[in-house]
């Protein structure tokens, strides 16, 4: 054969032969509801997360509605963000809410001591946060200050937000332009009280929890009884279970005077340990494999904590709330290290999909989660710079997962296979399925292998599938990113799937997240 013909043939063949993955799904088998709150976000007063990311002020040339960026609001609406945790984080345990209400010119300038000691004009306070929540169509998850605040301050903050009767605080809210009480869906009672939130022992925190749980009330008449605000206690931040043991053991015998609906868990993907050192740009498959390996620990972590919760709460009344999670990489060069700025690559989108799949598999106990953080901080959905905005690969993964919100988990049986990279061994495939309220079956399949495509062969029982369509998120390299100059390097694209005799066939691109809808 002429060498030029041989070269041409080589160029048209895939470089790596596709493996086959067999999946079987019985659509008639229903598991737990995948609570939409698993797709929650975290927006702390940190770096450019709020200021510049959300808030530009009403006088800004950047298009805004009452100071809140229109481009960011439109992008977030497409994600159907179910809840937003605010104001912290470590910042929350230094926050005094009164600094952030009333006429902007009269608000005091303070220091954000938790994050870089920068001056905070307090322009984005309670009323601005609630405006943001309403603009994006979400629910407020307010984290109260248990470390340096008092129960009275927190109780008054909730009264300011939720009282409908003409109390002095409700009148103050009305004078600030908001006569109707706000809805506060979730109350976080402290943050990392074992660390930045006061370095408390579990027993000390427990006594604080009882006080705050009792006295910090939601007075909104529409949030009573079955629609009540859910209270979330500080939970562990390590695989150790003593903290969970202390809180849950006490909860088992709680009386009318205190209660919780959730226990939080914080866990970041930091493959090389603290301080975070993985680069967020310009890395290769070895770093990619290490990050994914590290993130898969979430499953074991949840199992450990759930085992303790099950001992004291067999009926799963208390949810495990993973209200801080995500990839924490080294800060980007040239940025303030306290602002936790990192790029977001295809690796992060795949990492997000693996975690969302883990949460879905634990959906009976894990009913809420908040990725850290929403904009310009850590594993962000959105990056901004002045008037520019770019949507990250993680944003697109979240957009592809929207149909899983409140869908019913359907078990998927598959052989995950194995992919090995420099001593790191990973499953090659991950998958979840769920049925939505309209009867559609949704299938997500992640191909972790950065080099080899996978021929998917899925057997679907319990449902006659008439049509299949889907989207794939992939890119040329594991470290591909979207930038202001090149915002569409990592965006979902349509993928073709074949249906024949109850089987679905498609090729999964290397390093990809694919979501398929199967219509009855
Ligand atoms: O998300 C950044 C920080 O990480 C939060 O403020 C804190 O709760 C956690 O340690």
Image (tube, rainbow, N blue to C red):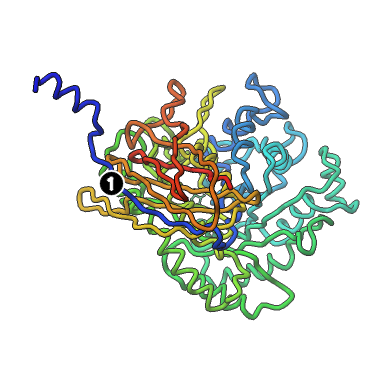
- Mark 1 CB within 8 Å of ligand 1: no
Residue 216 place in picture, x, y as percent:
73, 61
- The answer to whether residue 108 of the structure is visible from this angle is no
Q: How many marks?
A: 1
Q: Is residue 205 visible?
A: yes
Mark 1, secondary structure of its residue: strand
> Residue 103 falls in which quadrant of the image?
top right
- Residue 24 vs 99, above or below: the answer is below
- The residue drawn where x is 46% and y is 61% is 237
User: Mark 1 — residue?
Assistant: 19
- Give whichever of 37, 271 is nearer the camera: 37
Work out which residue is located at the far right of the displayed protein and give it: 166
Q: Is 390 situated above or below 33?
A: above
Closest to the observer, 439 or 224: 439
* Quadrant of the drawing holding the N terminus: top left
Q: In this orientation, which residue lies closer to the viewer: 395 or 203? A: 395
Dot 1 alpha-carbon crowd within 10 angstroms: few under 14, some 14 to 19, many 20 or more: some
Q: Residue furthest front?
A: 501
- Horizontally, residue 129 falls left or right of residue 429, namely right
- Residue 334 percent coordinates (x, y): 39, 30
The residue drawn where x is 64% and y is 35% is 121
From what the image shows, is residue 119 above or below residue 148? above
Q: Residue at x 44, y 49 (%)?
A: 503
Percent coordinates x, y for residue 371 in the rendering: 52, 48
Q: Is residue 314 left or right of residue 101?
A: left
- Image coordinates of residue 351 in percent, x first then y, are 41, 47
């Amino acid at each position: 054969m002429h060498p030029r013909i041989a070269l041409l043939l080589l160029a048209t063949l895939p470089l790596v032969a596709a493996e086959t993955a067999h999946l079987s799904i019985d659509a008639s088998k229903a598991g737990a509801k995948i609570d939409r709150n698993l797709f929650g976000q975290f927006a702390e007063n940190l770096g450019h997360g709020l200021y510049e990311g959300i808030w530009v002020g009403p006088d800004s040339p950047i298009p805004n509605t009452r100071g809140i960026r229109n481009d960011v609001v439109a992008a977030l609406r497409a994600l159907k963000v179910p809840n937003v945790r605010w104001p912290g984080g470590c910042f929350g345990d230094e926050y005094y809410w009164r600094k952030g209400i009333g006429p902007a010119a009269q608000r005091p300038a303070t220091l954000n001591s938790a994050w870089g000691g920068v001056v905070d004009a307090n322009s984005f306070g309670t009323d601005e946060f609630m405006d943001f929540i309403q603009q994006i169509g979400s629910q407020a998850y307010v984290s109260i200050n248990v470390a340096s605040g008092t129960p009275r301050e927190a109780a008054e903050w909730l009264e300011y937000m939720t009282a409908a009767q003409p109390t002095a605080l409700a009148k103050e809210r009305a004078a600030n332009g908001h006569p109707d009480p706000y809805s506060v869906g979730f109350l976080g009672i402290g943050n990392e009280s074992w660390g930045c939130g006061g370095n408390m022992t579990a027993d000390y925190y427990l006594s604080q929890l009882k006080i705050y749980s009792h006295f910090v009330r939601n007075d909104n008449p529409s949030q009573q009884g079955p629609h009540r605000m859910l209270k979330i206690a500080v939970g562990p931040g390590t695989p150790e279970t003593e903290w969970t043991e202390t809180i849950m053991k006490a909860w088992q015998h709680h009386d009318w005077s205190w209660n919780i609906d959730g226990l939080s868990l914080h866990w970041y993907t930091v493959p090389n340990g603290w301080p975070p050192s993985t680069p967020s740009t310009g890395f290769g498959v070895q770093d990619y494999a290490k990050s994914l390996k590290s993130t898969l620990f979430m499953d074991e972590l949840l199992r450990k904590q759930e085992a303790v919760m099950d001992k004291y709460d067999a009926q799963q009344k208390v949810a495990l709330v993973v209200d801080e999670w995500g990839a924490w990489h080294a800060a980007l060069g040239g940025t303030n290290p306290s602002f936790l700025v990192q790029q977001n690559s295809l690796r992060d989108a795949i990492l997000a999909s693996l975690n969302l799949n883990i949460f879905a598999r634990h959906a009976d106990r894990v009913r809420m989660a908040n990725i850290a953080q929403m904009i310009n901080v850590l594993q962000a959905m959105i990056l901004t710079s002045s008037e520019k905005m770019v949507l990250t690969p993680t944003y697109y993964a979240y957009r592809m997962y929207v149909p899983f919100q409140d869908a019913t988990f359907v078990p998927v049986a598959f052989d995950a296979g194995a992919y090995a990279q420099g001593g790191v061994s990973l499953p090659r495939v991950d998958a979840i399925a769920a049925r939505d309220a309209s009867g559609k079956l949704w299938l997500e399949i992640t191909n972790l292998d950065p080099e080899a495509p996978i021929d998917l062969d899925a057997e679907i029982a319990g449902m006659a599938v008439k049509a299949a369509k889907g989207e794939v998120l992939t890119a040329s390299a594991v470290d591909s990113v979207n930038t202001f100059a090149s915002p569409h390097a990592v965006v979902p694209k349509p993928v073709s799937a074949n249906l024949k005799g109850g089987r679905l066939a498609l090729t999964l691109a290397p390093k990809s997240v694919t979501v398929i809808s199967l219509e009855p």
